[in-house]
């Protein structure tokens, strides 16, 4: 079982502007090893923009994001190796099978100790391993996207509406994966319109108008 060292993700005076609209400004928070931060708020308030800033995909208009005390822009590739980002889109290649999609994970970052077979079994897609992703249901595609989290040794998970298309069983599975990750010292920052059952986990919530 992976045990991560103590580390934190910190945002200082973050501001984000879309066109001429201020989505948020002077946003401050810190998430440490073993913690979950749930970002809540109405549609269009900037939850996705914040997650993209935390991932380094988008540049903030003001402020600083640091990982272990160092600016993520300066850390560059070393930060990306520590971080897994799952956006609204599943990011899977529909022309490849479930198995082939997961085989690509080793190209993009540090690989965990879990095997692809174990990941497929955990997410309930063992029988779909050879099936092209294009032929999976929306919920199965989301499960396949989540399986990548099991195969990367990333301590920080940034997840944008990860429950999209999941049924009750899929949601329950996701909740267990998150609790296991933080129990091992990982960090999870996610946005969700759903009420998550994360009993026993150190969970923070943040919202703004």
Image (cartoon, rainbow, N blue to C red):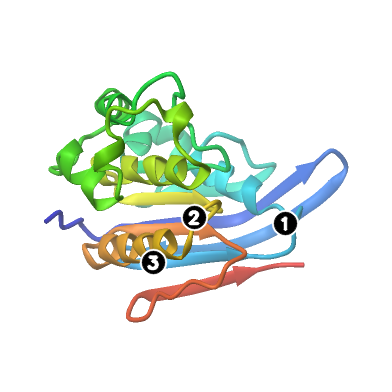
Q: Residue 172, labelled with which disc?
A: 3
The mark nearer the N terminus, 3 or 2, is 2
Name the quarter where the C terminus is drawn. bottom right
Residue drawn at x 44%, y 18% is 95
**Pair 1/3: label in front:** 3
- Give the distance between the C-alpha atoms of the residues marked 2 and 1, in whole angstroms: 33 Å
The mark nearer the N terminus, 1 or 3, is 1
- Residue nearest the viewer, comparing 58 with 121: 121
Characterize the local packing of mark 1: few (<14), some (14-19) or many (20 or more) Cα atoms within 10 angstroms: some
**Pair 2/1: label in front:** 2
Instruction: Report helix, strand or loop for mark 2.
Output: loop
Badges 2 and 1: C-beta atoms under 8 Å apart?
no
- Residue nearest the viewer, comparing 110 with 66: 110
Farthest-out residue, bottom: 200
- Residue nearest the viewer, comparing 114 with 12: 114
Characterize the local packing of mark 2: few (<14), some (14-19) or many (20 or more) Cα atoms within 10 angstroms: some
The mark nearer the N terminus, 2 or 1, is 1
Q: Residue 166, labelled with which disc?
A: 2
Residue drawn at x 29%, y 31% is 102
Res 9 quadrant in image: bottom left
Residue 30 left/right relative to 114: right
Vertical comparison of 196 with 46: above or below: below
- Give the distance between the C-alpha atoms of the residues marked 1 and 3, in whole angstroms: 34 Å
Q: Would you name the residue on which mark 1 appears? A: 25
Instruction: Report helix, strand or loop for mark 3.
Output: helix
The answer to whether any part of residue 114 appears in the image is yes
């Amino acid at each position: 079982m992976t045990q991560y060292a103590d580390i934190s993700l910190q945002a200082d005076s973050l501001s984000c502007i879309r066109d001429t609209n201020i989505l948020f400004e002077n946003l401050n928070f810190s998430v440490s090893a073993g913690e979950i931060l749930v970002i809540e708020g109405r549609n269009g308030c900037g939850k996705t923009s914040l997650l993209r800033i935390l991932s380094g995909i988008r540049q903030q208009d003001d402020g600083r994001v640091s990982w272990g005390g160092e600016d993520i822009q300066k850390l560059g590739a070393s930060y990306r190796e520590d971080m897994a980002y799952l956006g609204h889109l599943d990011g899977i290649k529909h022309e490849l099978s479930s198995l082939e999609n997961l085989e690509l994970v080793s190209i993009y970052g540090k690989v965990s100790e879990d095997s692809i077979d174990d990941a497929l079994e955990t997410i309930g897609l063992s029988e779909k391993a050879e099936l092209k992703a294009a032929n999976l249901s929306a919920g199965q595609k989301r499960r396949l996207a989540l399986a990548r989290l099991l195969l990367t040794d990333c301590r920080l998970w940034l997840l944008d509406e990860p429950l999209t298309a999941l049924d009750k069983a899929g949601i329950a599975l996701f909740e267990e994966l998150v609790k296991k990750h933080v129990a091992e010292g990982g960090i999870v920052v996610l946005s969700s319109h759903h009420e998550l059952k994360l009993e026993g986990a150190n969970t923070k919530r943040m919202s703004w108008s």
